[in-house]
Image (cartoon, rainbow, N blue to C red):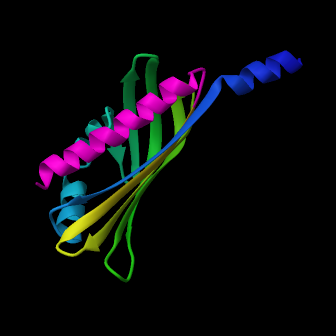
């Protein structure tokens, strides 16, 4: 029984990523663009939106280790200083064994530019730690590339 528990623990891998960068536009412009292009933002992370309903989004991600399908809840808020915050949290894993998926993006004014910070955490059953880290880094890099390309 102990070896079964140890094998189960080993087969659930996690990764955390974070990145910050500047884009040449004010916070309202960046936020409005992200809201208008939500599916492009998801696609930049190598995912495909299957369905949107209110604050819930059903997504498919195809990787070298399999297909992941899940439902997340999205939330966008603004604080009193005009900073914008986007949150996405895993509600349901439909296929692929994802046990956690959270993404946080903050948009803060930095002079005439916007400081974009993305943080993400993911945990997946049955996938090696290296593969989970590669997937998380690929998503983070795709998001950054899209934002920098859009707001040159």
In this rendering, does residue 26 appear at all? yes
Estimate the x, y position of residue 11 in percent, counting from the top left: 66, 22
For the residue pair 39 and 17, the one nearer the viewer reads as 17
Residue occupying the point 47% across, 34% down: 70
103 in relation to 46, above or below? below
Residue at the extreme right = 1
Specify start and end residues of the magenta stretch as a single range.
124-152
Residue at the extreme left = 152
Estimate the x, y position of residue 8 in percent, counting from the top left: 73, 22
Residue occupying the point 32% across, 37% down: 45
**The C terminus appears in which quarter of the rendering?**
bottom left
Estimate the x, y position of residue 36 in percent, counting from the top left: 19, 55
Residue occupying the point 34% across, 73% down: 83
Residue occupying the point 19% across, 68% down: 113
Residue at the extreme bottom = 80
**Quarter of the image holding residue 40?**
top left
For the residue pair 123 and 145, the one nearer the viewer reads as 145
In this rendering, does residue 41 appear at all? no
Residue 13 among magenta residues: no
For the residue pair 131 and 30, the one nearer the viewer reads as 131
129 in relation to 1, above or below? below
């Amino acid at each position: 029984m102990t070896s079964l528990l140890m094998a189960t623990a080993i087969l659930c891998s996690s990764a955390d990523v974070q990145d910050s960068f500047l884009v040449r536009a004010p916070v309202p412009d960046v936020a409005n663009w992200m809201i208008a292009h939500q599916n492009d933002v998801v696609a930049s992370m190598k995912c495909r939106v299957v369905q949107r309903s209110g604050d819930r989004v059903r997504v498919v991600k195809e990787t070298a280790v399999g297909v992941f399908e899940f439902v997340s809840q999205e939330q966008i808020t603004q604080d009193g200083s005009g900073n914008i915050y986007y949150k996405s949290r895993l509600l349901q894993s439909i296929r692929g064994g994802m046990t956690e998926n959270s993404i946080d993006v903050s948009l803060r004014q930095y002079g005439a530019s916007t400081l974009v910070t993305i943080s993400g955490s993911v945990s997946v059953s049955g996938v090696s730690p290296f593969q989970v880290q590669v997937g998380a880094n690929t998503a983070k890099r795709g998001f950054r590339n899209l934002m920098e390309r859009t707001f040159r």
